[in-house]
Image (tube, rainbow, N blue to C red):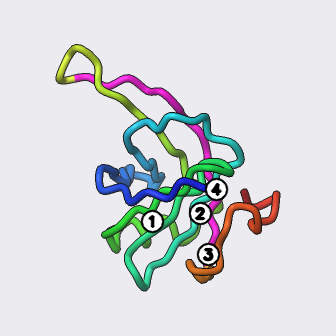
Amino acid sequence: MAKTENINGFDFVIGDKNEVLLVLSAQEQIPNEPALVLDPEEHSATLFRNEDDELTLENVSDDAFKALEDKDEVMVCEVEPTDNPDETRIVYNYYAEIIRDADDEDIDIDNVPDEKK
């Protein structure tokens, strides 16, 4: 059974050349064939990290959706704090395939085609 969790601590960082980086707190399991399902109408996205981890990102900004509209994938960086409060450590850094026009209620990582995971 997949673990579903709502994540509030995330940020889409948009660079000068419209490159996009999703930064969030590190999760326990290793990402495997990740996919990001966008839902602009609900201002949310769901990150399927692997068969067991499904993270819902709520209140995604319009700027993030606009920056992602012509992308096929997004770089994801999962971080954790260090002893220095001004620094974080990168735990996982990977690309997630972007999936559009999907009905959130019908998405299940087992039903996402391999080429879109």
| Residues under numbered marks 1 and 3 in contact, where contact means CB atoms less than 8 Å apart | no
Residue on which the image places disc 3? 100
Q: CA distance from mark 4 to mark 3?
A: 24 Å
Amino acid under label 2? Lys
Q: Secondary structure at mark 4?
A: loop
The tag earlier along the polypeptide, 4 or 3, is: 4
The tag earlier along the polypeptide, 2 or 4, is: 4
Q: CA distance from mark 2 to mark 4?
A: 30 Å
In this view, the residue farthest toward the left is: 85
**Local crowd size for mark 4, using a 10 Å CA cut-off: few (<14), some (14–19), many (≥20):** few
Above/below status of 38 relative to 23:
below
Query: Residue 1 shows which numbered tag?
Result: 4
- 113 on left or right of 5: right
Amino acid under label 4? Met
Amino acid under label 1? Ala
Residue on which the image places disc 2? 71
Q: CA distance from mark 2 to mark 3?
A: 10 Å
Q: CA distance from mark 1 to mark 4?
A: 33 Å
Q: Which residues are magenta?
A: 87-100
Q: CA distance from mark 1 to mark 3?
A: 14 Å
Q: What residue sits 36% from the left and 50% below the top?
A: 13
